Image: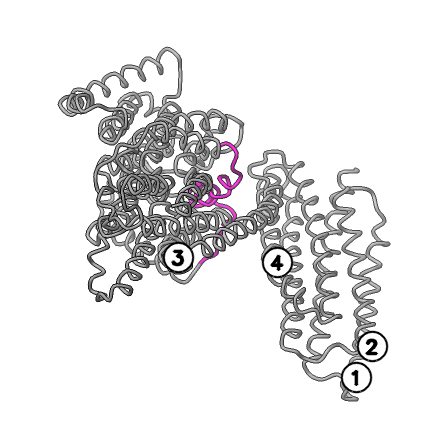
Amino acid sequence: MGLYAFAVAVLFVIAVVDLMVGVSNDAVNFLNSSVGSRVAPRYVIMVVASVGILAGVTFSSGMMEVARKGIFFPRHFMMPELIVIFLAVMLTDVVLLDLFNTFGLPTSTTVSIVFELIGAAIAVSLIKIFDSGQSLLDLAQYINTGKALAIISGILLSVGVAFICGALTQFITRLLFTFNYKKGLKRYGALWGGMALSMITYFILIKGAKGASFITPAMLVWIKGHTWTILGGGFALFTVLFQLLMLVARINILKLVVLAGTFALAMAFAANDLVNFIGVPLASFHAFMVAKASSAPLTMLMEAMEEPVQTNTFFLLIAGAIMVATLWLSRKTRTVSKTELSLGRQEEGLERFDSSHLSRIIVRMVIHLFDAVQRVCPNSMRRWLTKRFNAAGYQPEPGYDGTVPEFDLLRASVNLMVASALVAWATSMKLPLSTTYVTFMVSMGTSLADQAWGLESAVYRVTGVLAVIGGWFFTALMAFSVSLVFAFAIGYLDGIAIFGLLILVAYLIFRNIKIHGLREKAAQELELLDLKRVKDADYAVRTSFEHSGRFLDVVRADLGACFEGVLTQDRKQLKKLRRQTSKIQKWSNTIVANIFKTLRLIQRKDIKKAGKYAYVVSALQEISESLRDVILRCHVHTSNQHAGLLPEQRKELQQVRKYVEALLAETASILLARAPFEYREVAAHYVDLKQFLEDCDNSQIERIHSGQSKTRLSILFYGINNACLKISEQTLQLLTIFNETFEMEER
């Protein structure tokens, strides 16, 4: 029994880690609407969510049965076999969730735990079947296929239901209030807010009360018998309260609705998803205690696990405290949040995801569908709808910190109201509905209804949604496969496998921490380049030049590393550089986007002044493309094991490198410091490079005639020189534009 007591202790330790990685991923579900709309300072949002979590954990007692008997039949398993299942599940869950957190992808903790239970239970069942000589058809005796299929189908169905509910609710809400909702809010705001909060109260406090650990049967009977009284009374109370707040205190009631919705969704999350983190360890503890009290602890079947058990509220509150601490301290929470916020934001701009063939097909199909609907829709109705959904010149009001939010309070309130209602209803039905699926798809549905996916961004947003949904299927596949393998390993190797897997999990988590740190650092660099919505044209111009200087400094470093790689034939270094070319491209695109924002500001003041800044765009793009081209050429040449550069070519390329790096370094320093400089001295590097390249051409022609330089080597040599010449030309172009701007300022 000592080994199994140790295993149960390990499970509780893993549960703490699982709570931390799970909350880091799932916090996006209830924080994003408040954070995205900038409804209040972040600490206020966090306090509201924390209170919601602590209240919600007491509602999750009934959900704990899913981990004990929702996927398999405990009566066919002995305590050691259940411990094997639970260990495999928890080890897999920690690794999988931490991996998704590292790359900032929201995934479903519910889907992961369900498929992990299925995979581990099948593995242990197969071991029992092989040992007893049973047929594979007997597998159905061990696995609760009906319940498992019901859970899986419910989770998948929630994707479509949540998207449709979010889109329809937001469409009706926006139709009622329009984008300029202040006037409509004065007329119908109290009624709308009263309906929203009464619905939240109904689903959270009434429907969710079934699973609460502190609700007595008598209280539950009274609540069921007075449902409509409580619902109607709540609607009347909230409506009157909101109307008074609007008239007397001049309070924006949408802020109250969003904060109340954040509390409600955090509460629903804790009630529905807590089972994903501590349900398995609690089930293992229950199995161990039942076996320990028997005369044959290692051989008795666990029929007692199928009896209803009320979870101790103390355990639930401890879990809630860990979740709250993680919510405040985890850095990965913000990484996951950025994905959903970027896909649902109202304004266009740089997109995290690229377009894909499938996303383009989907966008074309939707456009054709809308065109068909418009053709059959009466002109009067089309004009009315166009007027109600006119978002021309619309900008969400600045948030509490003065920054422009990703979307307005109206959409945030719909996100929270619909998502909390769906999740709480599932909790009341004891269905482990995926909180992530519901909140993400509701958010995507409302953003679609709000026309956030315009023609400029639709393909990228659809690609992002498809990538996230694809990650969900990957979650299911990996959860099933890894837990299956882990269960087989533990089942056959016992303690050796447990210690080995613990070491493996610890290593993977440590590795993910390092990867996340590097990704976070790269993301912060890009964030610093984003001007958002700057109003000062002069500041925008200065900042754009400063960013261009930083960009040139990075180009110089990467170009130098590329020269080192090709001269020493270092394939690994060139491979690493090739992977980083996307970073240079993102930098270039971010600066270009900032320049377009700058052009809009300048054109209002002086249209003549704006023309030359357009050349900065082409210069940056040309530099980025040339750098990517030379890195790609060098990597392909080296990877294909082609002949290395000749000694004379190495010497000439070293001189080319010297000229280009000098020009890049001095230009970057000038743009960053905005200090006076002598244009001819800096431009001399370009003049010297151009003259030297002409001499290199003559020498290379002689090498070709003599047969020293073969075809592929000649292609590489000319490709490097041409790319360096283009980079130098465009760098000089940037310097020329900066010089003209500097001289105009001096005058």
Instruction: Report the magenta residues as a range.
Output: 328-355
Cα separation, mark 2 vs mark 4, equals 30 Å
Q: Residue at x 51, y 54 (%)?
A: 504
422, above or below 619, in the image: above
Image quadrant of residue 429? top left
Which residue is at the far front?
295
Of residue 299 and residue 194, the one placed in the foreground of this image is 299
- Give the x, y percent position of residue 320: 40, 31
Cα separation, mark 3 vs mark 2, equals 53 Å
50, above or below 638, in the image: above
Cα separation, mark 3 vs mark 4, equals 28 Å
Q: Residue at x 70, y 44 (%)?
A: 546
- Give the x, y percent position of residue 352: 50, 50
Which residue is at the far bottom?
706
What residue does disc 1 label?
Answer: 703
- Give the x, y percent position of residue 600: 57, 41
Which residue is at the far left?
225
Residue 384 seen: no
- Asked if the stretch drawn in magenta spans residue 410, the answer is no
Cα separation, mark 1 vs mark 3, equals 56 Å
- 71 sits to left or right of 476: left
* 3 or 2: tag closer to the N-terminus: 3
User: Which amino acid, by three-letter code, is at mark 2?
Assistant: Glu
Of residue 123 and residue 669, the one placed in the foreground of this image is 123
Image quadrant of residue 539? top right
Q: How many neighbours does mark 2 have within 10 angstroms: few (below 14), some (14-19), or many (20 or more)? A: few
* 2 or 1: tag closer to the N-terminus: 2
What residue does disc 3 label?
Answer: 478
Image quadrant of residue 646? bottom right
Dot 2 and dot 1 residues touching (CB under 8 Å): yes
Dot 1 and dot 3 residues touching (CB under 8 Å): no
User: Which amino acid, by three-letter code, is at mark 4?
Assistant: Gln
